[in-house]
Amino acid sequence: MSGTSGTTVALMWEARAGAGRGPELLEWARARAAELAREPLRRELLRAPQDRVLVLTWWEAEYGDELPELPEPDPELITRPVHRWRFESLGAVDFPG
């Protein structure tokens, strides 16, 4: 990882729990986010209806750098494969008003 340019990369990990397993998936994701191989600049855990869980991590890195990511949960815990996205931060934007 170069990390010297001041570039920030955000990784998004999103999964949907099997019926009635939302709390279990949430705790699973919380534990995995705490065990990453390196400490991110920031991490955030979110939930949404239909037992969806989202983990966001921010890293000082170049877009293509190898970064620690959450693994795929056991298939019995989720209803579909995990969705993953990677974004490069363009900085905060102030809107008039």
Image: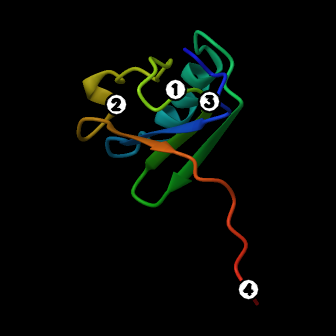
Q: Earlier in the sequence, mark 4 or mark 1?
A: 1
Q: Residue at x 45, y 61 (%)?
A: 49
Q: Which residue is mark 2?
A: 77
Q: Name the one closer to the observer, 29 or 69.
A: 69
- In the depicted structure, whether residue 69 falls above or below residue 45: above
Badge 3: few (under 14), some or many (20 or more) residues near its Cα, within 10 Å?
many
Q: Which residue is mark 4?
A: 96
Residue farthest to the front, as pictured: 5
Q: Are marks 1 and 2 in contact (CB under 8 Å)?
A: yes
Q: Nearer the viewer, mark 2 or mark 3?
A: 3
Rendering coords of residue 34 (x, y %): 65, 20
Q: Residue at x 71, y 30 (%)?
A: 41
Q: CA distance from mark 3 to mark 4?
A: 29 Å
Q: Residue at x 55, y 36 (%)?
A: 9
Which structural element holds mark 4? loop
Q: CA distance from mark 3 to mark 1?
A: 22 Å
Please state if 15 lies on the left or on the right of 24 as rendered.
left
Which structural element holds mark 2? helix
Which structural element holds mark 1? helix
Q: Earlier in the sequence, mark 2 or mark 3?
A: 3
Badge 1: few (under 14), some or many (20 or more) residues near its Cα, within 10 Å?
few
Q: Earlier in the sequence, mark 3 or mark 4?
A: 3
Figure quadrant of the N terminus = top right
Q: Earlier in the sequence, mark 1 or mark 2?
A: 1
Q: CA distance from mark 4 to mark 1?
A: 40 Å
Q: Earlier in the sequence, mark 4 or mark 2?
A: 2
Q: Which residue is mark 3?
A: 59
Q: CA distance from mark 4 to mark 2?
A: 44 Å
Q: Nearer the viewer, mark 3 or mark 4?
A: 4
Q: Name the one closer to the observer, 51 or 20.
A: 51
